[in-house]
Image (cartoon, helix red, strand yellow):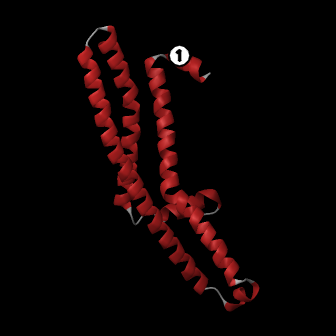
Amino acid sequence: MTGKLGVYRRLFSFLRPYPRQFVTAYVAMLGATLLNLFVPQIIKGAIDRGLEENHPAALFVAAALILGIAVVRGGAGFLQRYYGEWMTHRVAYDLRDTYYIALQELPFSFYDRSHTGDLMSRATGDIAETERFAGVGLLELTGVVLLIGGVVFAMFWENVYLALLALG
């Protein structure tokens, strides 16, 4: 397990004890991302039916749907952030615990060459950065990548030529 892939595998091994929270956070993120993609379609339908075909009730239905989506998206966002932060803190605790155990098992000759304060300071900073990445950072990165992919897909679904023009 050398290189960057090994580091990620080891990091994900700290997430393994929390599968329910991991799945809940990612399902909530996926739900919130997918709901973000529906709002433009609802607005398109409201404009097409409500304004062009002169059906004012379609505007109220669209407004109610958008409001409902906002409420569900807010709940999904809460679950995503709650479980993401929960996992982040647990992973950081497990990392610190593993680090302190490893420090205690080092030979005394190691401490003759290294200053304990420097080790603790560096470890605290590294664990804090890993903490941000492991939980919320990775979750947000995945959400943004899915949202961009969904937007590009929706653009091509609506009109290939306009999508190529917009992206090119």
Which one is nearer the viewer's eye here, 75 or 164?
75
**Residue occupying image coordinates x 47% and y 37%:** 147
The residue positioned 33% from the left and 19% from the top of the image is 45
Name the residue nearer the viewer: 13 or 116. Answer: 116
Quadrant in the picture for residue 43: top left
Q: Tell me which residue sits at (50%, 28%) in the image.
A: 152
Residue 137: percent from left, percent from top: 52, 53
Could one spot residue 9 in this view of the protein? Answer: no
**Residue 119: x %, y % from top left:** 67, 78
Location of residue 56 (image quadrant): top left
Q: Secondary structure at mark 1?
A: helix
Specify whether 24 is left or right of 95.
Answer: left
Q: Amino acid at mark 1?
A: Leu
Residue 27: x and y, percent?
36, 48
- The residue lying furthest to the left in this view is 57
Q: Quadrant of the C terminus?
A: top right
Disc tally is 1
Asked if 86 appears above or below 152 in the picture, the reply is below
> Quick one: label 1, few (<14), some, or many (20+) residues within 10 Å?
few
The residue wearing badge 1 is 162
Q: Residue furthest bottom?
A: 108
Seen from this angle, which residue lies furthest right? 113
Q: Can the viewer see residue 34?
A: yes
Left or right of residue 14: residue 60: left
Residue 1 in the image: x percent, y percent?
A: 60, 63
Q: Quadrant of residue 106?
A: bottom right
Which of the two residues, 6 or 19, is positioned nearer the viewer here? 19
In the rendered image, the residue lying farthest to the top is 53
Compared with 14, 23 (above or below) is above
Q: Which residue is located at x 52 percent, y 47 percent?
A: 141
